Image (cartoon, rainbow, N blue to C red):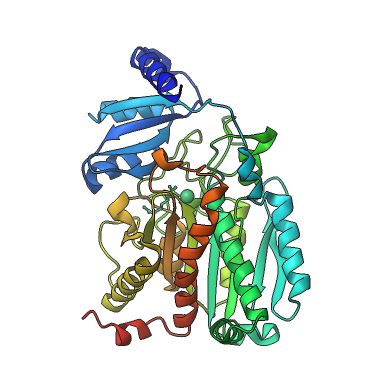
Amino acid sequence: MRKFILITAMAVLAFLPLRQAESVDSTQYWMKISAADKFQRSLVADTGVAIEAIADDYVTAVGNLEELKHLRERGLKVDVSFPLTAKMNFPPQDQEFHDYGELTAELRSLESRYPNLVKVFSIGKTVENRDIWAMRISGDLAHADQLPGIIFMAGHHAREHLSVETPLRIWMNLLERYANGDERVRRLIDGRDIHFIPAVNPDGLEYDIEGGRYHMWRKNRRLNADGTYGIDLNRNYGYKWGTGGASASPGSETFRGPTPFSEPETQAVKNHIEAHQNITVLLSFHTFSKLILYPWGWSYDGVENARDKAVHETMAKKMAEWNGYTPQQSSELYVSSGDTNDWSYGEYKMISFTFELDPASMWNGGFYPGAGVIPEVVNKNTEPVLYLLEYADNPYRVLEADPVF
Ligand code: 0X9
Ligand code: ZN
């Protein structure tokens, strides 16, 4: 059945007159675009489509008809394309994912179960006036600012529900391990100031599941001047903002917004991080592709400071031993500007990572792999989280333990 829809969609699209591509049509399409290396992928990203998965000689991406036209104008071959109009119901097993209300309740419950370890508070309001929750975890909450700090974030992109679920459950488990007397977990939580923003884009997350079906939504829910919705929050951070791979068109999946930090969601993250200068390490969870990414994303060059480069590479490689993901510089994927890591490293010199969690590809479920994958993904990403906690006091220590130059 799926094959039939695909073939029909391919046929429909193949005969779409270009004229139609010029009209304002906000429908998004899955596209399979020939692109053999990071340079061709950057050319693709620069049209404004959101690249979602990469294979040897092509990428799969989501974009609109205008972007399809630009791709073709640049001589890029778009092999397959079909509209994202499929109406999927939540598969029953997906009920296990936390929606915003359940997430809020879960955080409150953790706070009341572990009052000496957990504090939950809002770091600001979204476009639709939802609270953006932060959970702070430490064995010494009163003096946490004086401890080495680390921040975990998730849910920048609406449809990446597994990115919210995974760190949330990792923290639920680690708090339980603390309560059960796990020595290592106790030492790490006692000695660190841990920040966790589980849903940077709750408006998007809620919209994506509105009406009991998935909407394949990525951005926030800002109503743009031209009537389209959404800014890509992972193109809205203020370091090298707007320099490439981030669209200036409001209807695009990767619309960077009118100005850096134009969005209350990225502004809230900025304010929070500015207020906590003890934070040395940042990890932002996304899905999917099984990757560990580090800066730069805006440039093909690696970070200029050799030690910082070595720390990122060493830590990424080590974490890959546990989760089996591929460690690489972000721009190896494609160049794009305004992402979280470029800003957190560029502005604050935090050691910064993005995990693109499971699955490996859209053929394995893409953004909607089903709740069945949660336990495995939580399991294999727990050790990387503990490792980052371990070295948050001085990430450069990894160079002593495992020298690379
Ligand atoms: O494009 C993104 O924002 C991230 N991938 S996702 O599929 N979750 O949307 C990757 C960001 C990597 N950063 C750069 N390439 N700059
Ligand atoms: Zn993402």
Quarter holding the C terminus is bottom left
- Residue 262: x, y in percent? 56, 51
Name the side, left or right, on which 218 lies relative to 327. Answer: right
Q: Residue at x 76, y 65 (%)?
A: 109
In the image, is residue 263 above or below residue 190?
above
The answer, for residue 50, to whether it is visible in the render is no
Front position in the image: 38 or 11: 11
Residue placed at 38% from the left, 37% from the top?
A: 61
At 48% from the left and 54% from the top, the residue drawn is 286
Q: In the picture shown, does residue 186 fall above or below 268?
A: below
On screen, residue 211 versus residue 91, left or right, reads right
Placement of 392 over or under 204, stated as above or below: below
The foreground one among 227 and 54 is 54
Q: Is residue 173 left or right of residue 43?
A: right
Q: Give the mark count.
A: 0
| For residue 109, above or below residue 202 | below
Image quadrant where residue 20 sits: top left
User: Residue 72, image x and y in percent?
Assistant: 28, 26
Q: Which sits in the foreground, 243 or 273?
A: 273
* Quadrant in the rendering for residue 397: bottom left
At which x and y percent is residue 212? 67, 35
Q: Name the side, left or right, on which 400 lies relative to 52.
A: left
Q: Is residue 289 visible?
A: yes
Q: Residue 143: x percent and y percent?
A: 66, 87
Instruction: Tell which residue pokes out farthest to the right in this image.
Output: 112
At 46% from the left edge and 75% from the top edge, which residue is drawn?
Answer: 388
- The answer to which of 188 and 222 lies nearer the viewer is 188
